[in-house]
Amino acid sequence: MEIMSSSSPSKTPPSGSLFSALRRSSDDLTGRKNLQLLIQLRWIAMFGQFATILVVNYGFDIELPVAQMLMVLFGLLLLNAVSLLRMRLPKTIGNTELFLSLLIDVATLTMLLALSGGASNPFVFLYLLQVILGAVLLEVWSTWVILVTTTLCFGWLAWYGHPLPMPLDHSEGLFSLYIEGMFICFVLNGVLLVVFINRITRNRRQRDEHLAQLRQRAAEEEHIVRMGLLASGAAHELGTPLATLSVILGDWRHMEPFKSNGDLAQEITEMQTQVLRCKSIVSGILLSAGEARGESSEGTTVRAFLDDLVDEWRETRPVKDFSYSNEFGEDLSIVSDSALRQSIHNVLDNALEASPNWVRLSVYREGKTLLVSVADRGPGFAQAMLDNLGRPYQSSKGRPGSGLGLFLVMNVLRTLGGNLKASNLVQGGALVTLSLPLSVVALKQERGETNGD
């Protein structure tokens, strides 16, 4: 049995559709756990009350309206069956449903007490358990309604209830049936309270931690959106000057002073190459921003995608010793994703900066997951960076604005349903592993086969 409080207001979270969606999902999970708790408590109550009826009626020879009390228990059984069916529906379980469930529990307890001695029944103090559950599970107004209802029920039982034909043997202490009943009720309430309070504390702590993670994720998403808008705007602004530079350099190549000078011609060629690279970067930014999804969604395969990515990165970076192994196995048709391409480039760039002499890229498959590992022989990650992996501005470079590479990679992978892990190698250096579900990038005609592996 688990209790998760839905009555405690939380601080205003950062705005964002992601947080709202995750918060609704968290609230729905909370409501379902709370309803599951009430269902489990009813099972315990039904078995306990059934056993008590048998013991009192047949063991102590105290006459009870057994048939009517069993009908009440049958009503609880039907309520639990309906509650179990409700658990299967996708609609969110909120305060109103839990409130009505507790009211029904109070009503059934009142009927059972009315049939077994009214307010003189020592188990009348089980009303306190209903009030405590209301305080834990419900909103404030609902809790007050439960308290007023149980108070009125207690008063009605005291006014109209008929005590059971029990001997007045209170002076016998624990040998008195009434005192024994009160003792059992006290122990039962105490045990349930200890169990519930402990679970309330644990689940509230877990829920607060979960909400803190949701706030952090929403803040990171908002940060990503702002960076994306700035990058997209900058890419638009850079398009015109880059095109102008490309035209000017093309004209220079045909001018006699430059054509006759081999060194100048070579430098112009290099400048054109760098301009083309800048234009490619700008196109990649716009592509990742969703402004050219037609190109972004072209089909390819895992091997072709990674081989092209590696060739492109190797040709444009001053890497001395680069090791590349692709052990993916049977090839798979996928959608070429520019954001994923740029993410792997970012990890490779970080490894190259930390280890200019050697970088290794390994590709392999585990079940339905694509794994891409990048290793280097640099100084490795500081423990603080490993503890805060994926958060912005976590870097050992000491430059303003540094530490965004892994943050961006983490968010891209998280959006695609993947993950990123980092560790330090025993022999020195660092290892960064990107994992991505193949079902996310597989072409539509092959997704059925991928999911059915």
Image (tube, rainbow, N blue to C red):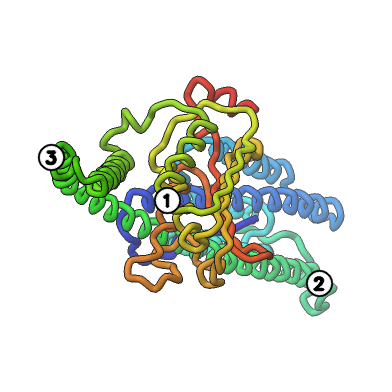
Residue type marked 3 = Met
Q: Nearer the viewer, mark 1 or mark 3?
A: 3
Q: Quadrant of the C terminus?
A: top right
Q: Quadrant of the N terminus?
A: bottom right
118 left or right of 131 in image: right
Q: Residue at x 53, y 50 (%)?
A: 419
Q: Residue at x 70, y 70 (%)?
A: 186
Give the SS element for disc 1: loop
Q: Badges 1 and 3: C-beta atoms under 8 Å apart?
A: no
Residue that lies at the very extreme toward the front in this rendered image: 260
The residue under label 1 is 317
Give the SS element for disc 3: loop
User: What is the x, y in percent for residue 291?
Assistant: 26, 37
Q: Nearer the viewer, residue 89 or 237?
A: 237
Q: Is residue 360 visible?
A: yes
- Label 2 neighbour load within 10 Å: few <14, some 14-19, many 20+: some
Q: Looking at the image, tell me whether mark 2 or mark 3 is earlier in sequence order.
A: 2
Q: Nearer the viewer, mark 2 or mark 1?
A: 1
Give the SS element for disc 2: loop
Residue type marked 2 = Ser
User: What is the x, y in percent for residue 304?
Assistant: 50, 31
Q: Nearer the viewer, residue 372 or 447?
A: 372
- Label 1 neighbour load within 10 Å: few <14, some 14-19, many 20+: few
The residue under label 2 is 176
Picture quadrant where residue 258 is located? top left
Q: Looking at the image, tell me whether mark 2 or mark 1 is earlier in sequence order.
A: 2
The residue under label 3 is 255
